[in-house]
Image (spheres, helix red, strand yellow):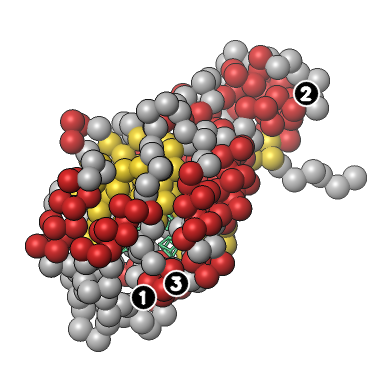
Amino acid sequence: MEAEPLVDLKNLHAEALVDFLAGMGKEKFRADQILRWIYLRGVTDFAAMTDLAKSFREELARRAFISDFTHETVEVSTDGTRKFLFRLDDGRSVETVLIPMEGGRNTLCISTQVGCAMQCSFCLTGTFGLERNLSTSEIVNQVCAVRRDFPVDNIVLMGMGEPLHNLDNVVDALKILYAPAGLDYGPRKVTLSTSGLVPQMYELGQRIKVNLAVSLNATTDEVRNRLMPVNRRYPLQELMQACQQFPLAPRQRITFEYILIRGVNDSQADAKRLVRLLHGIKAKVNLIPFNEHAGSEFKAPEEADMRAFQTYLLDRQIVAIRRAGKGQDISAACGQLKGRLEAEGRGLAPKVPVPGIGAGG
Ligand code: SAH
Ligand code: SF4
């Protein structure tokens, strides 16, 4: 008889773990015990799970294993941002960024794919295409590994990849992050950012609670088509309708990310159109200066234009925050991950080395 492949327990959310254990004739409460060992104590060896019978531990070891990440490298920015690189089983790698926030809290920016299929013209990750989806455990392990060394207060799915293009694994990963017996993050501590895959936005809203961020970046279809090819499939009107219908808790808002690019989307007319687009939506806006990199001809906005854009929104009672580009000196910004590595590997590196290539959002 051929052996069943071992199940990675970090791919199973609580309900799936209950089912898995039921298949071994075990009670439901065993799932919580095991979740605590894995996610609170960081145990990867069943032998260490001392409140389980020895025979049960041995049977678990015959059927399952617990995967884990150890970072291969970590780079520390002058502003305290840390970029971790994890090597995956197939030799590919993924990056995760820990960003210190005001008030001493830490936000962890995690990746959901290796590469990205969406091809946004301003984004370095997008220029390389999609290599593959991350599994549920590969998403969760980024959090587990960093939490061993640093407190992680908030989690943003804003690293490499389009989370809604890997929806099933992302939803399972969120369930694991939320499990009360395990990592126990409240859904309000976790934000998922999308480029605007409209059908998957509806599906996400029905399947699980999470803060939603939308990378908007333009106020006309013409400009957005040029910046984000996904807009040709799901134009602004459909996108804004999906935002309007996204389920929100009483004081919850959708975050709209808007990268300001000089002469492309940073005019007062854009600000005016943005106010109109957001009408009737519980929104806040994150303004992000475009981060110049060798893979793109776009330019960062003038300081004065950026300020005028923000003022226009604030004057109309729209919450508009300027997001500082953290970790620029180590290419650690969201959306820019693995930029330097890939650019060099594929001969796309600039002829003259540019310090901090790819640092952005
Ligand atoms: N794919 C999802 C998840 C995050 S993408 C999405 O697009 O929403 C990474 C983030 O980095 C996005 O918010 C994107 O707008 C931002 N980003 C990408 N390239 C950038 C650049 N050159 N300058 C500033 N921000 C950038
Ligand atoms: Fe992908 Fe987001 Fe970059 Fe667009 S901005 S290419 S969706 S990672």
| Quadrant housing the C terminus | bottom left
Q: Residue at x 36, y 63 (%)?
A: 219
Residue type at mark 2: give it: Ala
Q: Residue at x 53, y 42 (%)?
A: 245
Q: Residue at x 43, y 68 (%)?
A: 221
Q: Position of residue 5 (x, y in %)?
A: 75, 45
Q: Position of residue 21 (x, y in %)?
A: 73, 25
**Is 133 or 225 nearer to us in this picture?**
225
Q: Secondary structure at mark 1?
A: helix
Q: Which residue is mark 2?
A: 22
Label 1 crowd (10 A; few <14 / some 14-19 / many >=20)? many
Q: Which residue is mark 3?
A: 225
In this view, the residue farthest toward the bottom is 351
Q: Residue at x 67, y 27 (%)?
A: 15
Considering only order in the chain, which callout, 3 or 2, is on the residue closer to the N terminus? 2
Q: CA separation, marks 1 and 3? A: 25 Å
User: Is 305 drawn above or below residue 153 in the view shown?
Assistant: below
Q: Which residue is mark 1?
A: 343
Q: Secondary structure at mark 2?
A: helix
User: Is 212 drawn above or below residue 236 in the view shown?
Assistant: above
* Visible residue check, residue 83: no
* Visible residue check, residue 247: yes
User: Is 231 drawn above or below residue 68 in the view shown?
Assistant: below
Q: Position of residue 153 (x, y in %)?
A: 33, 31
Q: CA separation, marks 2 and 3? A: 50 Å
Q: CA separation, marks 2 and 1? A: 48 Å
In the image, the residue with mark 2 has its CB under 8 Å from the nearest atom of ligand 1: no
Considering only order in the chain, which callout, 3 or 1, is on the residue closer to the N terminus? 3
